[in-house]
Amino acid sequence: EIVLTQSPGTLSLSPGERATLSCRASQSVSNNYLAWYQQKPGQAPRLLIYGASNRATGIPDRFSGSGSGTDFTLTISRLEPEDFAVYYCQQYGSSPRTFGQGTRLEI
Amino acid sequence: QVQLVESGGGLVKPGGSLRLSCAASGFTFSGYYMSWIRQAPGKGLEWISYIDSSGTTIYYADSVKGRFTISRDNAKNSLYLEMNSLRAEDTAIYYCTREGGYFYYWGQGTLVTVSS
């Protein structure tokens, strides 16, 4: 199974700043089938990015995904107050689907 | 619009059983693969089971294999998760999701607590 390791565990930033979140896979993710989710307290996760770099419907363009193979990045260009949440990466290139442990983005 | 509504969670003793249901609407349920994903309190996300559109291809995470059974009733637009031999570590919110490799649609989740 592919293990996804996210870093940092917690990222402390301010509104208006740029956030860079990392997701590293234990082996290459087939077809760059890597997704990113945002989760706020008491809510289900929300899909942000799929296929490493494709924004899901309705996701603001300040969110962008990049990377390939084993190294992937989620970038939030200018943080809005509503962006402070937990972010997870997930691979779906091989079974079983696996998630990273999450990065908490806090003010 | 797509809606997934889970039900059936609750408090159960270790070794007990529970059946979760997910009512789907707003899309052609019989045309989509579905998955269950869970999240222990304060922890991350764990995919636990997948079923194809006809119910013939099924996968489980090792953590639940042999104890949990996923099924579906396309006539009722419903997904199920039969959980047996429950353990404390199965305590989590269980989410029903529509499969696409990635998970775009999620239910609100149902809480399962395994405790004596």
Image: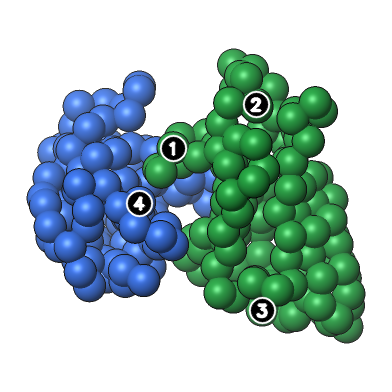
Chain colours: A blue, B green
Subunit ID for the residue under disc 2: B
Alpha-carbon span between mark 1 and mark 3: 27 Å
Secondary structure under tag 4 reads loop
Is the residue at mark 1 from the same chain as the one at mark 2? yes
Subunit ID for the residue under disc 4: A
Q: Nearer the viewer, mark 1 or mark 3?
A: 1
State the image quarter where residue A16 is shown.
Answer: top left
Residue A84 tag number: none
Mark 2, residue position: B29
Mark 1, residue position: B100
Q: Is residue B32 above or below residue B15?
A: above
What residue is shown at x 60% (from left), y 35% (from top)?
Answer: B53
The kind of residue tagged 2 is Phe
Is the residue at mark 1 from the same chain as the one at mark 3? yes
Mark 3, residue position: B89
Q: Which quarter of the image is occupied by the N terminus of chain A?
A: bottom left
The kind of residue tagged 1 is Gly
Subunit ID for the residue under disc 3: B
The kind of residue tagged 4 is Tyr
Alpha-carbon span between mark 1 and mark 2: 13 Å
What residue is shown at x 57% (from left), y 59% (from top)?
Answer: B59
How would you rate the neighbour count of disc 3 (Cα within 10 Å): few for under 14, some for 14-19, many for 20 or more? few
Q: Which quarter of the image is occupied by the C terminus of chain A?
A: bottom left
